[in-house]
Amino acid sequence: MGSSARKKKEKKKDFQKAKLKVGKTKAKPDNFTDTSFKAKSIVVNQQSLTTSAPSSSSQFAHYLSLASSSRSDTQRRDALSYLTTQLSSAPVNRPLPLPTSILLPKLLPLILDGSSSVRAQLLKFLRLLPVSDIGDRAESALLYTRAGMTHLAAEIRVDALAILEWLLEVAKEDVVSCPGGWVKTLKSFMSMMGWASSSGSSKWTSTSKASFGKAGKAFPRQLLILAQFLKAGLVESEEIREVKIGGMFPLVDVEKHMIPTRSNAFAHLNLFGSSRDEEGEMYIDREDRQRVFQKLFQPAVEAGMANAKKEAGEAGRAAAVLAKVLKEGMADYSDVNDTQ
């Protein structure tokens, strides 16, 4: 009897309607098959559906924008690497994809970049630019170079010296004669090396050198770059020296009567610009640079050079090179008529 009641109950169970409770989903049948799916896609920003590839100049401009504005160190370095490859692989007489007047203002701020790999790649790129395009933009390049020379980070100061060395190789005359190129750069050297005359006395101090921390390791290189800078500004070039010896007698000062090779030959007169002080002045003539150097920097440089010679080693040898350049550059200063 009990078994038949149980069978009836099981048969009745098949026809009963399940009661649903509020908040609970309906139970799924035993033979339920899940047919749902999820779609995955890759979205690329600024993707183009055109069939034609972008031109080389547009790609160059795109990577230039990445190098100058990207927040990622790796992306800035890779973008500079691409630009360097494009210039190095191009034919010799082929013009740049973008003019130097556009490239330099965007890339010069990278002299102060916090990544050493970005600064190293920047120097490789700058060395590929046409030499003739650098002279007219030496002033803007020196602006960031001087900021790097007095930076708190020792690595940035070292790399800024490498930029200055490159500028002296390709446009030394423009570097020492552009507005602020002589006095402001020498003051940056004095600040970086700790060579400064204390105000109100003739004593020499080196307090700032100690504040830079790792300056001692780079000190010999600083002396050598300073020697190159002083040689460019104080030592007479071989061409002028040959003329003075008498190679074109009876002609005298022929180079001063020739057609100027500068794009703005009368910029030193400052006819239409704002007034300049002694630091921002242009010192075109070697005699003017000698006068300013003797008045503002020679005592501090000689005192610092004497202390560097006492250190011996690399610093002593670099100081000997600097002393030779200084002696050669200022040997004929006594014959200069100092009227200012």
Image: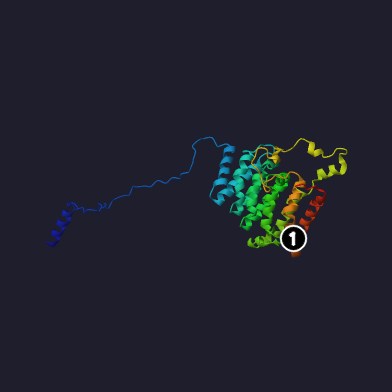
Q: Nearer the viewer, residue 142 or 194?
A: 194
Q: Nearer the viewer, residue 126 or 302?
A: 302
Q: Nearer the viewer, residue 172 or 314?
A: 172
Residue 262: image location, x then y, percent: 72, 38
Picture layout, residue 59 above or below residue 34: above
Which residue is pictured at 86% across the width and 44% down the height? 245
The quadrant of the image that shows the N terminus is bottom left
Relative placement, left or right, of 3 versus 287 is: left
Q: From this viewpoint, is residue 209 visible?
A: yes
Residue 172: image location, x then y, percent: 73, 46
Which residue is pictured at 74% across the width and 60% down the height? 303
Task: Name the residue that disc number 1 marks.
Answer: 303
Total count of labels = 1
Disc 1 residue type (three-letter)? Ala
Relative placement, left or right, of 274 versus 311 is: left
**Mark 1 nearby-residue class (10 Å; few <14, some 14–19, many ≥20):** some
Picture layout, residue 67 above or below residue 257: below
Which residue is pictured at 81% across the width and 43% down the height? 240
Relative placement, left or right, of 10 versus 63 is: left
Residue 121: image location, x then y, percent: 63, 49
Q: Nearer the viewer, residue 212 or 87?
A: 212
Which residue is pictured at 61% across the width and 57% down the height? 153
Name which quarter of the figure residue 59 lies in. Answer: top right
